[in-house]
Image: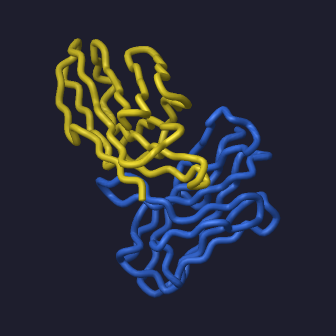
Amino acid sequence: DTGVSQDPRHKITKRGQNVTFRCDPISEHNRLYWYRQTLGQGPEFLTYFQNEAQLEKSRLLSDRFSAERPKGSFSTLEIQRTEQGDSAMYLCASSPTGVNTGELFFGEGSRLTVL
Amino acid sequence: ELKVEQNPLFLSMQEGKNYTIYCNYSTTSDRLYWYRQDPGKSLESLFVLLSNGAVKQEGRLMASLDTKARLSTLHITAAVHDLSATYFCAPTYAGSNYKLTFGKGTLLTVNP
């Protein structure tokens, strides 16, 4: 399977714990995005990487959130000191640059439940 | 800031009927995506519309884009139960790093 892969698919944690999600984009896709989706809402943009550079961060990304893409391949999204309001589906998407086909692919998502 | 408005937010229709979902957005966009989402699942790409006047069709779904009116439509022809899902539109543009701004989605229920 060469689609966008996310891990873990489900995570249940207690308030105050740290969690980390991983995204493996489609090979050779330079652009990588993280989104968050809560129940009944559309996904909201969190952050964007082009290769290893984090080029944009949403105001939604508080200081407790950090994202990396150290080698321009996989990316991680860490949430420190989780709060119940962090419960959501975290979606990763990737697309190539330099090809104007508009292709943008989402992974299956990582669902976080904070108790 | 790009704002997206979809309507209707909820749509209940009978099998065999036709209907259109509308997507209005607030600022210039040079491409627009339509996605389908089943409950508890991720987003499945339906269409990407890359230019004014673009029209794409796949099965019973047809999407169009009018960049001058800042409007996209998703037309459903002869609906079937399998089309029941939430549909999202998401415009974007180069100056935004092509990040997507999603509408609230349209929850479509097709009844037998």
Quadrant in which residue B25 is drawn: top left
| On-image quarter of the C terminus of chain B | top left
For the image, the number of numbered tags is 0
* In front of the other: A85 or B64: B64
* In front of the other: B103 or B17: B103
Vertical order, B109 against A48 (above or below): above
Residue at 44% x, 59% y is A44
Residue at 49% x, 27% y is B52
* In front of the other: A10 or B35: B35
Residue at 36% x, 60% y is A38
Q: Position of residue B59 (x, y in %)?
A: 43, 14
Q: Is residue A41 left or right of residue A59?
A: left
Vertical order, A9 against A19 (above or below): above
Q: Which color mode does the image show?
A: by chain
Q: Position of residue B15 (x, y in %)?
A: 22, 16
Q: Is residue A49 left or right of residue A73?
A: left
Vertical order, A12 against B40 (above or below): below
Q: Position of residue B56 (x, y in %)?
A: 48, 20
| On-image quarter of the N terminus of chain B | bottom left
Q: Position of residue A97 (x, y in %)?
A: 73, 45
Question: In blue, which chain?
Answer: A
Figure colour of chain B = yellow
Q: Is residue B68 left or right of residue A25?
A: left
- Residue sticking out furthest to the front: B68
Q: Is residue B59 left or right of residue A78?
A: left
Residue at 42% x, 24% y is B64
Quadrant in which residue A96 is drawn: top right
Quadrant in which residue B11 is drawn: top left
